[in-house]
Image: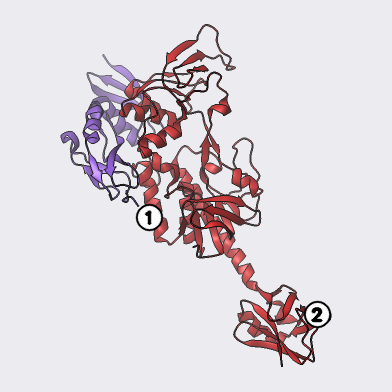
């Protein structure tokens, strides 16, 4: 029995309302998308939903006390709390360059956590 | 110290609009470009927007706010734009004089041939939406909380209610959840979401944070610290619906109830504002009603995408440079006539050099003190004598005249200023 699933595409700020026709976990068709990204998003969202994660880590001797960081690719949605817990353990030393790896291969996902900006040392 | 007294283009604010304007002003041929920032570093509000989603249109990359800012700051610095940090612009005149104040330089006046206003916007506060009730600690705008959590490392509270479904409010709902707070719910007075739909999905729905449309806050409770808020449903005219009140215990209330372009300075410069956008009236070059004053980004109207702010900045910067260059060329047509040794003033004060191609020009002046002996009245360009006239004596009561002849045109054309000195023969 096919069923319709409705959700909003988050691939870009346009926020298209997608309707996905599904049967036994298989996508039969997608409507409402205005580009290919929406199609990919519909497939991903129904099989392996993922999100970018952005947070901060402590930085010693930095211009600010925190360094913003982000996952270089979206991580599986169910793993987000564990990913955050792993990132929380990290502490780095200033100076740090933008996009330098702060945490490698978080939780074995193959995804690195990168510095969102350069952070000069204090003073 | 500042490298110049007069700049081609001065940009006020180093957020995405300002940085883009400075980049494009340089690329369009402006010589001296200065960007002024009141904070301790360049970047503006992007530095606290650590979430992703920036740059998808312009850079085809999904960057966090600080990364997006850094990308363009790097480009700007490579173009040798002069940077002034920790500096507040106190006043701007319609003649494009700027008055700056900073700890390092004190109070300084500079001039600009063109100005780009890029001050961004401010958040609407509790006072602007008039929420009744107590006035305890624990009420923040969403942006203030964002700065605390993402830059300075403080948590505003543990049990959070958010009023308003603006993007910053929804993004902070997720962010505070990440940091261990509990976001009870988001209330929205309108019957629809005020931010982007994607933020409803990835900030609220992903974390089971409820959004209540057609709801607002009837009063805030708590003497020293917020203890609860009373939520209420509203009808289509925003009147409270009796019997729908609900007391929600919390220690923190965040307000995400709109942004207003920040135009205090623009007003001082004589810039006319649109009552709907609260930003300047602009033409397609982003020029305001004041010639040579341009505006770009959220100071004009509030954007939803930073990429579009950068694009507005590029356009304003390019047009500001064009204006400045045209003005500089017009200035180069003229040479100032400067009162030198023993000369109090000269009329005319400046000379359109091309006039001398066709006709003689008479210069008249008065001396500072009498010289009762033969003198030379000399016109020079700082190095070479251009013409001189002998007088038997000079006295303040008697006007002195010297004539620049058409044959002097070639010499005058090369000069950047002419000085008149009176020396004993």
Q: Is residue A86 above or below residue B183?
A: below
Q: Residue at image x 40%, y 53%?
A: B73
Q: Secondary structure at mark 1?
A: helix
Q: Residue at image x 53%, y 56%?
A: B106
> Which chain appears purple?
A
Closer to the eye: label 2 or 1: 2
Mark 2 to mark 1 CA distance (whole Å): 59 Å
Q: Visible in this render: residue B291? A: yes
In the rendering, at what x and y percent does residue A33 appear? Answer: 37, 30
In the rendering, at what x and y percent does residue B118 appear? Answer: 52, 48
Residue with the most extreme top position: B243
Q: Are marks 2 and 1 in contact (CB under 8 Å)?
A: no
Total number of numbered discs in the rendering: 2
Q: Chain of mark 1?
A: B
Left or right: B32 as drawn, with respect to B376: left
- Residue B279 found in image quarter: top right
- Residue A112 found in image quarter: top left
Q: Secondary structure at mark 2?
A: loop
| Residue under pointer 1 | B74
Name the one closer to the observer, A4 or B49. Answer: B49
Q: Residue at image x 50%, y 65%?
A: B3
| Residue under pointer 2 | B396
> Which chain appears red?
B
In the rendering, at what x and y percent does residue B78 appear? Answer: 39, 60
């Amino acid at each position: 029995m096919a069923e319709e699933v409705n959700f909003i595409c988050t691939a870009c700020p346009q926020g298209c309302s997608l309707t996905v026709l599904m049967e036994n976990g298989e996508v039969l068709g997608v409507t409402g998308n205005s580009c290919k990204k929406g199609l990919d998003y519909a497939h991903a969202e129904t099989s392996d939903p993922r999100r970018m994660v952005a947070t901060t880590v402590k930085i010693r001797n930095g211009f600010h006390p925190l360094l913003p960081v982000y996952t270089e690719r979206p991580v599986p949605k169910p793993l987000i709390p564990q990913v955050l817990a792993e990132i929380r353990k990290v502490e780095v030393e200033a100076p740090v360059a933008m996009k330098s790896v702060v945490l490698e291969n978080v939780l074995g996902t193959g995804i690195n956590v990168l510095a969102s900006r350069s952070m000069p040392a204090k003073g | 110290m500042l490298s110049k007294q007069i700049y081609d283009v001065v940009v006020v604010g180093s957020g995405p609009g300002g940085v883009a304007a400075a980049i494009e002003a340089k690329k369009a041929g402006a010589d001296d470009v200065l960007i002024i920032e009141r904070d301790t570093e360049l970047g503006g509000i992007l530095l606290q927007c650590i979430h992703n989603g920036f740059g998808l249109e312009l850079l085809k990359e999904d960057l966090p706010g600080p990364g997006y800012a850094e990308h363009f700051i790097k480009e700007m610095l490579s173009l040798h734009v002069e940077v002034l940090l920790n500096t507040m612009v106190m006043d701007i005149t319609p003649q494009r004089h700027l008055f700056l104040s900073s700890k390092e330089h004190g109070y300084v006046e500079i001039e600009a041939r063109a100005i780009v206003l890029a001050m961004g916007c401010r958040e609407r506060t509790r006072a602007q939406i008039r929420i009744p009730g107590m006035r305890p600690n624990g009420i923040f705008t969403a942006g203030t909380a964002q700065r605390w959590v993402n830059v300075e490392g403080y948590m505003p509270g543990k049990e959070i209610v958010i009023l308003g479904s603006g993007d910053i409010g929804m993004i902070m709902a997720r962010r505070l959840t990440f940091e261990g707070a509990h976001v009870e719910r988001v209330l929205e007075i309108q019957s629809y979401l005020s931010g982007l739909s994607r933020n409803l999905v990835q900030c609220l729905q992903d974390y089971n944070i409820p959004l209540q449309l057609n709801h607002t806050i009837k009063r805030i409770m708590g003497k020293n610290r917020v203890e609860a808020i009373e939520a209420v449903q509203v009808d289509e005219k925003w009147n409270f619906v009796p019997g729908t009140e609900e007391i929600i215990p919390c220690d923190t209330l965040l307000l995400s109830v709109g942004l207003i372009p920040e135009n205090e300075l623009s007003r001082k410069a004589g810039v006319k504002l649109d009552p709907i956008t609260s930003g300047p009236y602009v033409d397609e070059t982003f020029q305001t009603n004041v010639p040579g004053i341009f505006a770009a980004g959220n100071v004009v109207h509030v954007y939803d995408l930073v990429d579009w702010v950068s694009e507005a900045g590029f356009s304003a910067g390019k047009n500001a440079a064009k204006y400045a260059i045209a003005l500089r060329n017009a200035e180069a047509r003229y040479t100032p006539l400067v009162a030198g040794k023993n000369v109090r003033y000269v009329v005319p004060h400046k000379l359109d050099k091309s006039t001398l191609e066709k006709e003689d020009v008479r210069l008249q002046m008065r001396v500072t003190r009498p010289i009762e002996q033969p003198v030379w009245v000399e016109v020079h360009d700082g190095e070479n004598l251009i013409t001189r006239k002998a007088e038997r004596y000079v006295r303040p009561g008697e006007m002195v005249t010297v004539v620049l002849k058409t044959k002097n045109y070639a010499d005058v054309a090369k000069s950047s200023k002419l000085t008149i000195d009176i020396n004993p023969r």
